[in-house]
Image: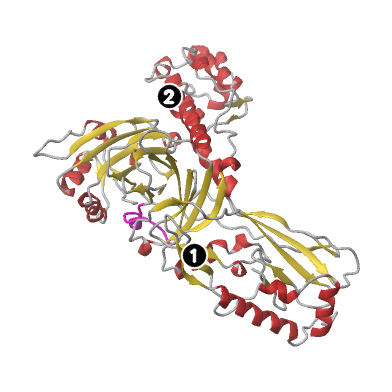
Amino acid sequence: MTYAPSTLISRLFTLALPGMLALAAWSPQVADACGGTFCDAGPQVMPVDQTGESIIFWIDESGGQPHTEAHIQIQYEGDAERFAWIIPVLEVPEVLVGSQALFNNMLQATVPTFTINSTSIGDCGGSFGIGCAAADFSAGGDGRNEAFSSGGDGGDTDGPEILDRGFAGAFEYVTLTGDNIAEITDWLDQAGYAQDPDAPPILEEYLEEGFVFVAVKLASGAGVDEIHPLAVRYPGVEPCIPIRLTRIAAVDDMAIRAFFLGDERAAPQNWPHVEINHSRYDWVNGPSTNYNEIVSLAIDEAGGRGFVTEYSGTDAIISTSGVFESSWSLSALEGIAAVDVVDELTSQVLMTCDGLECIFRHPQVEALLNIYLPAPDGVAAHTYWSCVSCYEGLIDETAWGTQPGFAADFEARIYGPAQHALEMLDNATQLTRLFTLLSPHEMIEDPLFHTTSGLPTVDNNIGATRVNDCDGGPSYIELPDGRTIALDSGGSMPELDGNPAALRIEQVPMMGPPQVETDNGDDIDGLLKAWNDDQLSGPEPGCSIGRVGLEGMLAMFGMFGIAWFSRGRRR
């Protein structure tokens, strides 16, 4: 079984998760010549990795007291009755339903995209193109949901104090505290929770720091297909990602993506900010082939903990398609008969069925139909929903009468979260995407974040140009930052000894410019110049075309308006 709910925290909030999924594999892409013409490779979009942890922070300063909402993307594989997790918090939060479509669109819009153009110089015989926590409280035994719902409220002398309880979509939650961690863990035992033996000492740290705990699990009868993002709303504007408990169940190089919606760029407060050395990416096969490796190395150079900024700019790049559609109508579903609900959902473009399959435009639509309009025994769901009137006599009226009712659940899980997602996007003007890779031994301090003014935007679309010499000279890459790096004799990216993965490591204060801790720019320039000079003046490679000398090479560069050394030193 694999767990991967995402995590978050502020000084007023900390989340515990039960584990993560492995990273998706990267697909190599090659910038090759087509026919006798060197062609642009075009945009190479990084895979939209849905694993690891993704958190969206919305800093809401529109009301009297500023609030932060932390939206958590939850991923889980396993039995529904074994899904459970703990959220340490400093204040009792409001628990809300989140929007999966918002996560999907945000991941898609901000994923790094690398454009590798190609051009050629010399006689090519033709034209050329220009181009906070992971405690595994897994439930065990029978009657888990019942025990969770009916656990004692505790008292001044016996057991924990129950501060709040309720439902959020498919989940039920209880917020509790105690005089010591034993009261908390004893309650979890009585409620049917199996506990990780490594978790209590770390939970005790949070308890001593004044945190209380929100215990969350799927509501009685809810299935894994009903899982959706959760959001917690709490006072304050200092978000943080809790990772102290995460180390219990984390994998090596676990991916964490944090999105921030607000009016200014967000940056790590107590962890370093890292800029990547572009000469370390594999621009021949595509940076997607070694992107995570280079980011991980750069983070290691910063001491094992740090974040890179993958995007910072306007939040207008986030599409609202699928998040909320004008065709959706809550009023049309209020009081609707069971036999008509599929036709209404179809008219709202939330689903389509053709007798062979059903396609759902929102992940919660199928979950709601399984609850309120389940297929009769012996009838496939897609067959039933394609023509409910054909089976009108077999409609399960008991299921249709399940509380709180189809329309109420539609509002709670689909309509309401969608409108709230639009409110978040309308309220904010800026979006920041931060990324890191962490292993368990590095998860010893919760990273805090803040917004700051004066920092430049960061484009997730990164371009480089491969320059191919048809007269036998070395091909080279013009990097996004203006530097150049010659390819080796085999046309591959060189591995230069001592070439750091991090261009710059800095601390970003709330006010003022970043404070640079390590600047590798001069070292990188020196390494690249030595390598490029060696490639220009080194021995002739085994090539039928032959290699021009240094003077001929420089003259040819001048002919094509290319200044090699000035490009090599441009920032």
Question: Visible in this render: residue 287?
Answer: yes
Q: Amino acid at mark 1?
A: Ser
Question: Visible in this render: residue 549?
Answer: no
Density class for disc 2 (Cα within 10 Å; few <14, some 14-19, many ≥20) is some
The answer to whether residue 157 is above or below residue 416 is below
* Of the pair 89 and 452, the residue shown nearer to us: 452
How far across and down, in percent of the image, does residue 59 sit?
43, 41
Who comes first in sequence, dot 1 or dot 2? 1
* Of the pair 359 and 438, the residue shown nearer to us: 438
The residues colored magenta run: 242-252
The image quadrant of residue 92 is: top left
Q: Report how far apart the C-alphas of labels 1 and 2 lie in the structure.
A: 42 Å
How far across and down, in percent of the image, does residue 251 sit?
41, 59
State the predominant SS element of the stretch in magenta: loop
Name the outermost residue toward the bottom.
539
The residue located at (44%, 68%) in the rendering is: 302
Q: Image check: 457 left or right of 120?
A: left
Comparing labels 1 and 2, the label whose residue is closer to the camera = 1
| Residue at mark 1 | 296
The answer to whether residue 558 is above or below residue 65 is below
